[in-house]
Image (tube, rainbow, N blue to C red):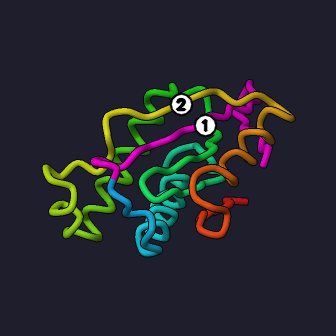
Amino acid sequence: MDELFKSYHKVFRIKYHFVFVIKYRKDLFLQKKYTETFKTICEEMQKRYTMNLETIGFDEDYVHFLLQSVPKYSPSQLFRIVKSITARKLFEQYPELKKDLWGGEFWRDCGYVSTVGEGINAEIIRNYIKNQGRKNSQLALMDFF
């Protein structure tokens, strides 16, 4: 979705492709309860922060998503916000995860972020997210349109 964000004197459209990896490459996203909870957390974040999580693709141990935001947040701030809130909320809802993830960290320190341009570039990234990772029959994809 190519939504324009507007403020008093500006109109903008800024998109990022993010990839987060679960600590110890645990295959937690094979369980629907975690992917559904992640989706719900992201929906709540969209209300609090000026962002639009456009497409999310889960593989067993990592998540790709296409995120649209405002210039108020740098890519590193968005990275930190999404990683910290999703981890905290997942641990709150599923305390047993702390045992599976020795030490109580949900995400690995690594990750990936890139900017996504208009038109065909966004469509290429969107299709990549939809088709990456597991076999298409196993890929859990969520569109936030």
* Neighbours of disc 1 within 10 Å: few (<14), some (14-19), many (20+): many
**What residue would you read off at disc 1?**
17
Q: Which x, y percent locates residue 61?
A: 42, 54
- From the viewer's perspective, is residue 71 above or below residue 83? above
- Where residue 113 is drawn, which disc sits there? 2
Q: x, y percentage for residue 29?
A: 44, 63
In the image: residue 67, left or right of residue 112? right
Q: Amino acid at mark 2?
A: Val
* 45 with respect to 91 (left or right): right
Whether residue 42 appears in magenta in the rendering, the answer is: no
Count of labels in the image: 2
Magenta stretch encompasses residue 8: yes
Quadrant, the C terminus:
bottom right
| Tags 1 and 2 touching, CB below 8 Å | yes
Q: Amino acid at mark 1?
A: His
Dot 2: what SS? strand
Q: Residue at x 27, y 70 (%)?
A: 94
Which quadrant of the view contains residue 108?
top left
Question: Which percent across, then down, holds residue 126?
Answer: 73, 46
**Image quadrant assignment for residue 144:** bottom right
